[in-house]
Structures are given as structure tokens and as C-alpha cells.
Image (spheres, rainbow, N blue to C red):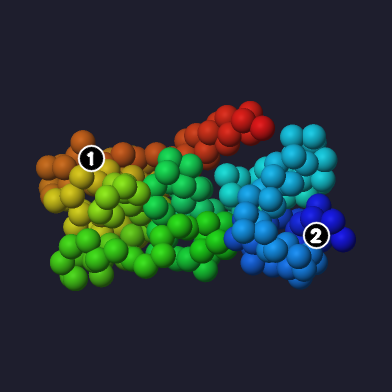
Amino acid sequence: MTKVEAIKKLMQDNGGLASWKYIYENIEKYYTAAKASPEWEAGIRGVLYREIKNKQNFKRVGFGVFGLEEYQEEKQIEEISKDQIRMHSYMEGIMVELGNYEKYITYCADPTANFQQNVFINQLTTLGEFPNFTYPEINAIAKRIDVLWFSSKGYQFPKRAIEVVDSIGTLGESLSRMYQLKEFQTDFYVLTPDKHIEKIQNTLSREPYSIQRNRFIVKTYDEAIDYYKKRLELEKLKF
């Protein structure tokens, strides 16, 4: 079996798509000599990129997610959008992917959630051990923030905190978690469906959040998805 055939079989086993981590961890199942070379990971990437460039067998589905040529990602995303819980984890996955693209170290409080079918967020995040960057009480709260982007150079400090607010009932806790990082140079992002925008803006106009209002950025799901897709299209052009 060739490397192409092995990668193809892995994707078939996994519902038509796979993350880099899944491919690396399972490639020997079908290609036993996959890790014989010290640069084996680069070799696998080269094979996959070559096939995509030639529009054969595979296509890019995310920054770190790839699928079979026939995989219908739009259909899958349409199904995800009908489920509030799945949509929540999909948005977390998008922000992890964007953080990786922007060269941050990424963390998610819900690592076992599905980004897309059979692609779990812990296959995308890059943080090994959570950095104890401040007092234990604040670290404990920070660990519950949906997504964090940490600086990749020097000491690891949170540069962006992201909360996905799919229900107004969770807004207070989401804002409070991020607000604990007010003493750090951290931007606070809130992602939410269109229907919650006005309520969130009103809440941010009142204390204590109004004091730090310029640090809070509110985006709709559609805005975040559109940005993600545009950045991904630019990445595809690199091939």
C-alpha cells in the first residue's frame, strides 16, 4: 500500500476526513514503514500537499483538517448548524484553527468536543500543559474559558480569550471569566448568534464591563465563519 492509499484508507475509516494528529498517530496501521525516516511527518505532509495541488484524492477542509476529494463539508456544516451544542463546539474549533494559523499556542476548555465529524478539538489545540501564568485562583477560572490563545514567544500569557455565547443564560458567567484577565494584555471576544447581539451590547455598556469596554469585541457566528473561510481560501492559494 502506498502512502496515498494509506492516508485515503485512514480518512475512509474516519468518515471522510482527518486531522494531522489523527493521520500521524494512525498512519502505521496501513503503512508500516511510515516513521522510518527522521523527517517522516514532513514526508506525509509532502504527499498530501502534492495530491491536493494536483486536485487528486484529497482536499483541504480546515487549516489542520483534510478530507477525501468527495467529502461534502458544506452538507456536514449545514447539519451542525441545526444543533446548538454542535454549533458551539464548531465555533470553538474555528477559533482554535484561527489561533493556530496566527501562530499562537491554543487551548480549549472542552477538548473532547467535535469540531467536525470525528475531528475532536484536542486534535487541533497545540498547548501541552496549561501554563500557570498567574495566581492559582485566576488560573482555575481561565481554564474554563472556551478558547484561549497564548503567546508563542517568551513566557506564555493569554493574548486572546474567546467565549461562545449560544444562550443569554450563560452570558454572565462567560463575561465574568474573561474579566478575570483584565490585568493582562488580553483581548476579549464574544461569539454569538445574531439574536443575542443587542442584549450582549447592552450588558457590556454597564459596569463593571463598561470600564474595559474597548477590550470586548462581539462578533456573530456568521462573521466569524466568513472570516475563517476567507483566511482558509488564502491558505489554499499557497499550494
- Measured as percent of width and height from the top left, residue 47 is found at 74, 46
- For image coordinates 19% across by 57% down, the residue present is 180
- Measured as percent of width and height from the top left, residue 21 is found at 60, 60
Q: CA distance from mark 2 to mark 1?
A: 47 Å
Give the amino acid at mark 2: Ala
Image side of residue 33 versus residue 223, left or right: right
SS at badge 2 = helix
SS at badge 1 = helix
Q: Is residue 103 visible?
A: yes
- For image coordinates 48% across by 66% down, the residue present is 111
Q: Which residue is mark 2?
A: 6
- For image coordinates 45% across by 57% down, the residue present is 126
- For image coordinates 63% across by 28% down, the residue present is 237
Q: Is residue 52 above or below residue 170?
A: above
Kindly identify which numbered label has been placed on residue 215: 1
Q: Is residue 84 visible?
A: no
Image side of residue 191 versus residue 236, left or right: left
Image side of residue 4 versus residue 238, left or right: right
Give the amino acid at mark 1: Arg
Sequence-wise, the earlier of marks 2 and 1 is 2
Label 1 neighbour load within 10 Å: few <14, some 14-19, many 20+ = some
Q: Nearer the viewer, residue 157 or 40?
A: 40
Please state, as top left, top right, bottom left or bottom right, where the C terminus lies in the image: top right
Image side of residue 9 versus residue 132, left or right: right
Nearest-to-viewer mark from 2 and 1: 2
Q: Nearer the viewer, residue 155 or 183?
A: 155
Displayed quadrant of residue 74: top right
Q: Is residue 178 above or below residue 59?
A: below
Please state, as top left, top right, bottom left or bottom right, where the N terminus lies in the image: bottom right
